[in-house]
Amino acid sequence: MDRDQLPLIERIVELLEERRAYREAHPITRDPFTLKPGFRAVDAYPPGASQRAIGAFEKKYNWKLPDDLRAWLRITNGAAGYLGVDTAERGSRISEIWESYPDWKKSNWIPIARDDFGNYYVALADKSTTSPVAFFEGIGSEYPRYLVGSDVLHFVLLKLLEFKDVAPGSSTSPWPFGREYVLKLDPSIEHLNIGVPLAWD
C-alpha cells in the first residue's frame, strides 16, 4: 500500500472506532422487528479479514484484489452496509452479489457496499491502477450511473462521513453531489477519465 495513503487509512480507522464506541454505549437490546428484549445484534464493524481469507478468495477466483480494496478488507470485513470475503453474515459477501450480477465479475467490477434501497457501490477494478468506485442502481444495473470515489479508500472515507458532515439545519448529506465538499476530501476524482460521469455532472 502507498505510504501516502496511511493518513487516509488512519482517519478511516478513527471513524470506525467512533462508531464501535457508540454501538457499545448504545447497544441494541430489542429485536427491531418484534421489539422483544434479549436481542443480540450482529457485530456491525467486525475485525478485518485475515491475509489467509483474502488469499483464499483470490485463489478461488484466480484474481488478485486491488491494493486499496485489500487495505479496506484488512481494516474491517463485512461492516454494516459493506461487503467482504468469507463473512459470517449471509448476504454480505462479494461472491454472493456476483452470483446475481455475473457480468460484473466478468468485467472485474467488485461490489463493495450497498444502500438501503437495493443499490450498489462497485469498484471498477478494470479502469485504472486504483479502483474508482461507482454507484449502480439495483434496477438497470448494467452500467455505472456516476462516480462516488476515486478509489476504494476515498469512497469509504466519504461514505463514513456521509451524515457526520451534514450542515446545521439540513438533513441532506453533501456527498456525493456536493462538488466542493467531495473535491476537498477526494480531489483526484475530478481528474479520472474513465467514461463515467461525476455525480454533479
Image (spheres, grey):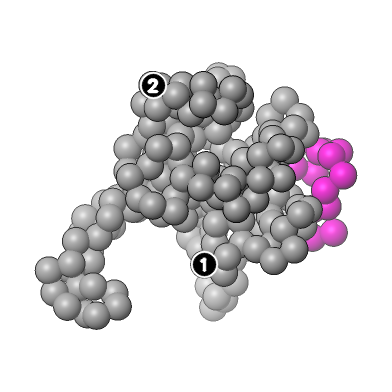
Q: Which of pointers 1 and 2 lies earlier in the amino acid sequence?
A: 2
Q: Is residue 182 above or below residue 64?
A: below
**Quadrant where the N terminus lies?**
top right
**Residue designated by label 1:** 116
Answer with left or right where residue 182 lies relative to residue 12.
right
Determine crowd level at label 2: few under 14, some 14-19, many 20+ residues with C-alpha closer than 10 A: few
Tell me the CA gap for discs 1 and 2. Answer: 31 Å
Q: Residue at x 57, y 28 (%)?
A: 61
**Residue designated by label 2:** 52
Give the residue at the far left of this rendering. 38
Tag shown at residue 196: none
Which stretch appears magenta? 187-201
Q: Quadrant of residue 152?
A: top right
Mostly what secondary structure, the magenta segment?
loop
Answer with left or right where residue 154 lies relative to residue 9.
right
Q: Nearer the viewer, mark 1 or mark 2?
A: 2
Query: Where is residue 192 shown, x and y percent of the image?
Result: 81, 38
Q: Amino acid at mark 1?
A: Asp
Q: Secondary structure at mark 2?
A: helix
Q: Secondary structure at mark 1?
A: loop
- Between 93 and 168, the one nearer to me in the picture: 93
